Image: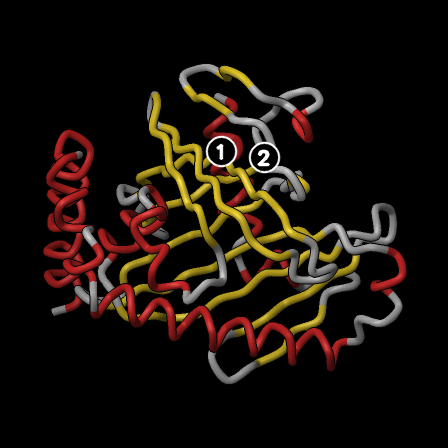
Amino acid sequence: ADKMQRVESMRKACSPEACTGKGWKKFDLESLTLWRCWDDKTGNLKLVMQWESPGSLQQMVASLRDSDVCEAAWDGGCWEMQNQQCGGATLARWLQKDPFSGKKTEVMLDRVLCDCLDDENQPCWVLLERAPQIEGFETFAGQWGGFNIKSVPEGYTRAIAAESGRVCESVGEDKCRCTMVIDFKIPSFVRWLLTDSLLQLGVSKMSKATGASWEKIISGWSDLGFDDRMRENKAFYDPVIERIKTHLEKQKTHGS
C-alpha cells in the first residue's frame, strides 16, 4: 500500500498541472522544460524537469536498475558505482562531488521501479528513489534487509536524499519522454545567490553533460556490458521486455 501511494504521489508530482500553483516558475530551456519552486518552510528547492531522449523504454529501465554498468560513460562525474538487488528493490551507490558545495559525497539510493503500462491515461514506468530509511543513516554500516551497507569512505560525507523519482513514457520504439522530480536541500548562503538565471544556466549545463553521457550509453550499450547484465538477470528482464513489446504493439495499433 505504501509503495502504491508513493507511485501515485510521484505521478502527480511529475504532471505539469502540479507545477502551476503558488511559487512555481516555468522555463523552456534548449533541451528540456524546467519548473522550479522554493519551499518557504524548509528552504528546499523543488525541481521538475521534462525531456525526450533517444533509447527504448527497456534501456531506460535497465539504466536505472543496473546503473553501475554505465560508470565508464559518465566521464568521471561519478565513480565507484555499485548496485545491489533484493526483493524487487535496488540499492544504488556511487561517489561524486556535491554540485553545490563541491565536497566529496557518497550517494546511496533505495530505488524501486514500477510497471504502470496498464494505465490507460498514462502508460509508463515509474522510478521511486530516496535514501534508505535508517535512523542515523549518515554514519550507518551493516545489514539493512537484504542489503549490505559499508562504512562511509574516509574523507566523504553521505548524502541524505529526499524522496524523488521520475516517470518514463515510450514515445516510439527508440525514444522516451522522462519527467523527473527532485528536491535539493540548499545551504542558506547559496539560497540567496541562486537566482533564476544561475539556476537555468546550471540546469542547462548539467542537461548537456548528462545528454552527452546518455548518448554514449545508448551507442555503446553492448560494449558497456548491458546485454550481458540483462542475460544474467533474465528472470527480471525477460518479462520486462515482453511487457514493453506488447505495449509498443498496442501503441502502434491505436496510432494507426
Horizontal side, residue 223 vs residue 78: left or right: left
Horizontal side, residue 14 vs residue 125: left or right: right
> In the figure, 241 relative to 190: above or below?
above
> In the figure, 242 relative to 149: above or below?
below
Q: Residues within 10 Å of mark 2 (few under 14, many from 20)?
A: many
Disc 1: which residue: 110
> In the figure, 12 relative to 32: above or below?
above
Residue at the image point whose x is 34% and y is 60% from the top:
72
Which amino acid does the dot numbered 1 rest on? Asp
Q: Residue furthest bottom?
A: 30
Q: Position of residue 87 (x, y in %)?
A: 34, 21
Q: Position of residue 190 (x, y in %)?
A: 83, 64
| Mark sitting earlier along the chain (1/2) | 1
Q: Position of residue 174 (x, y in %)?
A: 20, 67
The C terminus appears in which quarter of the rendering? Answer: bottom left
Residue at the image point whose x is 68% and y is 42% from the top:
157
Horizontal side, residue 107 vs residue 190: left or right: left
Q: Quadrant of residue 18?
A: bottom right
Q: Position of residue 23 (x, y in %)?
A: 79, 63
Residue at the image point whose x is 59% and y is 37% from the top:
153
